[in-house]
Image (cartoon, grey):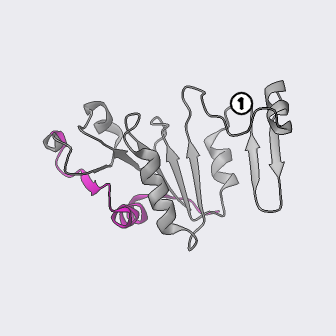
Amino acid sequence: MKIVAFTGKSNSGKTTLIEKIIKVLHPSYCVAAIKHDPKNKAQIDTEGKDSYKFFQAGADVVIASANKTTMMFQDALDMEFLYKMFYKKDYVFIEGLKELELPRICVVRDEIDEKYIPYSDAFALDMSVKNISILPSGVCVLDVNNPKEIIEWIDKNARKING
């Protein structure tokens, strides 16, 4: 499994980029995504449905069907647990969680925020970004509109974990 994290300001295009990469990789590769929700806003079930009621009442919930499984937990899960859960995947993409020590691509729109430089290994941006010159020499700059180029970087730089 190859694991890489994506970071960047809100509305910088992280989700859009990850989605593009997944579409290039799927169905040839098995891909998982972990999205950090720092403000606790994510809703993945429909109000009024049984699973929603169970979760709102305080239970961990697994929705199992013939084609997919959806899980909702009341507590934050340890990353090692999540890695193990995805051990059969070829790629795992993590959106956010900048404190995790993982190879990391910072997605940028408009201008680079200096606070992301210390923990980013590459920057995915386009030519509209005005302050590229603030990046230290040797930092990889990727074309945010070229998911194949970004996949090549991931293949070379991702953390590799054998199941």
Residue 86 is situated, as x and y percent measured from the top left of the image, at 66, 56
> Which residue is at 71% across, 30% downward?
75
Residue 131 as seen in the image, left or right of residue 23: left
Residue 134 as seen in the image, left or right of residue 106: left
> Which residue is at 86% across, 37% downward?
50
| Nearer-the-camera pick, 68 or 31 | 68
Give the quadrant of residue 8.
Answer: top left
| Nearer-the-camera pick, 69 or 91 | 69
Residue 108 as seen in the image, left or right of residue 136: right
| Nearer-the-camera pick, 89 or 62 | 62
As shown in the figure, which amino acid type bears the numbered disc 1? Asp
Is the residue 37 above or below the residue 5 in the image?
above
Residue picked out by circle 1: 75
Q: Quadrant of the C terminus?
A: bottom right
The crowding category of the residue bearing disc 1, from other C-alpha atoms within 10 Å (few below 14, some 14 to 19, many at least 20), is few
Query: Would residue 139 be counted in the magenta stretch?
Result: yes
**Residue 34 in view:** yes
Q: Quadrant of the N terminus?
A: bottom right
Residue 67 as seen in the image, left or right of residue 123: right
Is the residue 120 above or below the residue 29 in the image?
above
> Which residue is at 68% across, 40% downward?
44
Query: Would residue 6 be counted in the magenta stretch?
Result: no
Magenta residues span 134-163
Is the residue 89 above or below the residue 16 in the image?
below
Residue 96 is situated, as x and y percent measured from the top left of the image, at 48, 39
In what element is the residue under mark 1? loop
> Which residue is at 19% across, 51% downward?
127
